[in-house]
Image (spheres, rainbow, N blue to C red):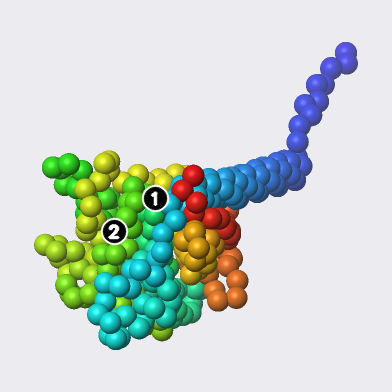
Amino acid sequence: MKKNITTKHGFTLIELSFAIAFISVLVITVTLITNEIISLYRKGYAIKTINQVGSDLIEDVVDSIQASPPAKISAFCDRYPSGSVSRTNCESNGGSFSVYQQYYTDVIITSGKQDNKKTVPLGGVFCTGKYTYIWNTGYLFGDQYRSEDGSPLSSRALRVKYKVGDTEGTAPSDFKLIKFEDPTRSTCAWNIYSTDDSIVYPSPSEYLSPRQISGESSVAYGFEIPINLNEAPVELLSKSDASLALYDFVIFPPAQYDVTNKLFFSGSFILGTINGGVNIMTSSNYCESPNTFNSDFSYCAINKFNFGTQASGV
């Protein structure tokens, strides 16, 4: 009699090892491709958000300027005694500080294993004649920036105190850009650059320094808005997934037509993400490579915007 012998077929240990290795490579490849797609999506979203918010901000500022009535800003210099240094400094730039001020400080920027020292803007104010804008820059919120003494820059953010009717208020300590009605430009007239109650107009070559808010600690610098507002300041750069902030906001000395007193404003601002590692150098603005200072390149975006328009009161 013949016996039927059943032969069982299966994978050898070598075949099984090759199969596991192939599947592992396939899973790793799919994971890397997925991560790359997610990174590209995040990068695209950050760039799209920067461009959209920047365009909206230009529209807001331009509308505010166009709605501002003509005014002779050089008349701001009349508040200083004739022949004084402050009067001379004011007249030398046509009273430009009555519409725009930005203050600066030296910071240490950590980039890779190297620390660099640079003078950067920390905040400022722009009084259009209809609305006023006050901002804190992204240097105050990024981990790679610190004061020369090693303390965090966030303690040097501008504070804003105001009053609506009988109610006193304070803007959030981490605000990035706020706006409120100020038709007389009184916020810019309230000299941010004075260290005491005296009225001092800075020379064109010196950096501005914010003054201390009365009744606050020695680190609370900024504005006590000298007018009774109709409503609380509005935040224009609220918290978002992209965490945007201004890194610079420059308003050039406005050109003025003497007959009508109409002002032509031109300016630029740099808008960037806080996350990701923005690096702003003298010659260029860019995002640091990954792991330079715990940065995530996919979250980083930065762009510079320019605008110009006339204040016509319409």
Q: Residue 130 — which label?
A: 1
Neighbor class of circle 1 (other Cα within 10 Å; few <14, some 14-19, many 20+) is many
Q: Could you tell me the amino acid type at mark 1?
A: Lys
- Camera-nearest residue between 131 and 115: 131
Q: Could you tell me the amino acid type at mark 2?
A: Ser
- Camera-nearest residue between 3 and 246: 246
The quarter holding residue 98 reads bottom left
Residue 238 shows in the view: yes
Q: Residue at x 49, y 44 (%)?
A: 314
Image coordinates of residue 274 in percent, x first then y, are: 46, 57
Judge whether 143 appears above or below 193 on screen: above
Between the residue at mark 2 and the residue at mark 1, the CA separation in whole angstroms equals: 11 Å
Q: Residue at x 23, y 52 (%)?
A: 227
- Camera-nearest residue between 304 and 231: 231
Image coordinates of residue 290 in percent, x first then y, are: 56, 62
In the current view of this chain or complex, which residue is farthest to the front?
259
Q: Tell me the residue that label 2 is attached to.
A: 186
Q: Residue at x 79, y 29 (%)?
A: 9
Image coordinates of residue 312 in percent, x first then y, are: 50, 51
Q: Residue 245 — which label?
A: none
Judge whether 289 appears above or below 275 on screen: below
SS for callout 2: helix
Neighbor class of circle 2 (other Cα within 10 Å; few <14, some 14-19, many 20+) is some
Circle nearer the N terminus (2, 1): 1
The quarter holding residue 217 reads bottom left
In the current view of this chain or complex, which residue is farthest to the top?
1
Instruction: Check the picture and name the quadrant holding the N terminus.
Output: top right
Residue 158 shows in the view: no
Judge whether 183 appears above or below 200 on screen: above
